[in-house]
Image (cartoon, rainbow, N blue to C red):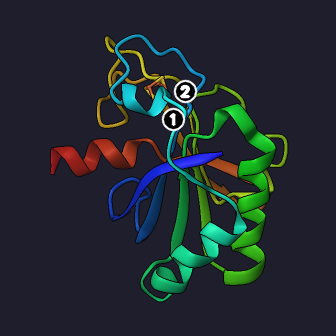
Amino acid sequence: MRFHNYDIVFQEIPDEVTLAINITHCPNLCEGCHSPHLREDFGEVLDTAALDRLLARYAEDITCVCFMGGDRDVPAVECLAEHVRTHYHLKTGWYSGRNEMPPHPMLFDFVKLGPYIPEKGSLKQRTTNQRLYRRNGEDWEDITGRFWRAVEL
Ligand code: SF4
């Protein structure tokens, strides 16, 4: 698994300061894909060593690590999420284009599901098919509406 780049973001996960890592070689075929370059297989290897290098710089400044993509290798994403939780005690998120929860959802505090469908729009639009869930213990709360309020304020 490889990644193109990363950024510290504030909107992708509500109420968190998030290190968002953009993973390449996306297997999804969303019509009207907003990031077609992320379908290509390129970038720096994303493993626990790469994650450690990033977190050596940013762990003190963030509250969450979010994996943007990685649907081609779900076990690898889960392994990295477990690494973050075990060694850094930060929250974890996953932006997936799939419609199903990962096999081990308890490794994540936030999971975004759903492919991008142009006529339904992104998470910021009320018509979206995509959903962002926040885990409360073993339950999942749909917090997609947080994006709509943020846009409408
Ligand atoms: S999940 Fe869909 S929109 Fe996102 S990079 Fe992959 S194909 Fe493009």
**Residue at horizontal 66 percent and vertical 45 percent from the top:** 1
> Which one is nearer the viewer's eye here, 86 or 138?
86
* Residue type at the position of mark 1: Arg
Task: Compare marks 1 and 2 and give the one earlier in the sequence.
Answer: 2
- Establish if 101 lies above or below 83: above
- Image coordinates of residue 11 in percent, x first then y, are 33, 57
Q: How many marks?
A: 2
- Establish if 72 lies above or below 5: above
Q: Secondary structure at mark 1?
A: strand
Disc 1 from disc 2: Cα separation: 7 Å
- Establish if 116 lies above or below 51: above
**Residue at horizontal 51 percent and vertical 35 percent from the top:** 131
- Image coordinates of residue 115 in percent, x first then y, are 51, 23
Apparent side of residue 125 relative to residue 117 in the rendered image (left or right): left
Q: Which residue is mark 1?
A: 131
Apparent side of residue 37 relative to residue 90 in the rendered image (left or right): left
> Which one is nearer the viewer's eye here, 11 or 66?
66
Mark 1 vs 2: CB contact within 8 A: yes
Q: Assess disc 1: are there few (<14), some (14-19) or many (≥20) residues with their C-alpha within 10 Å of its C-alpha.
A: some
> Which one is nearer the viewer's eye here, 142 or 20?
20
Q: Which residue is mark 2?
A: 114
- Image coordinates of residue 85 in percent, x first then y, are 72, 73
Which mark is in front, 1 or 2? 2
- Establish if 76 lies above or below 114: below
Query: Quarter-wise, where is residue 119 in the image?
Result: top left
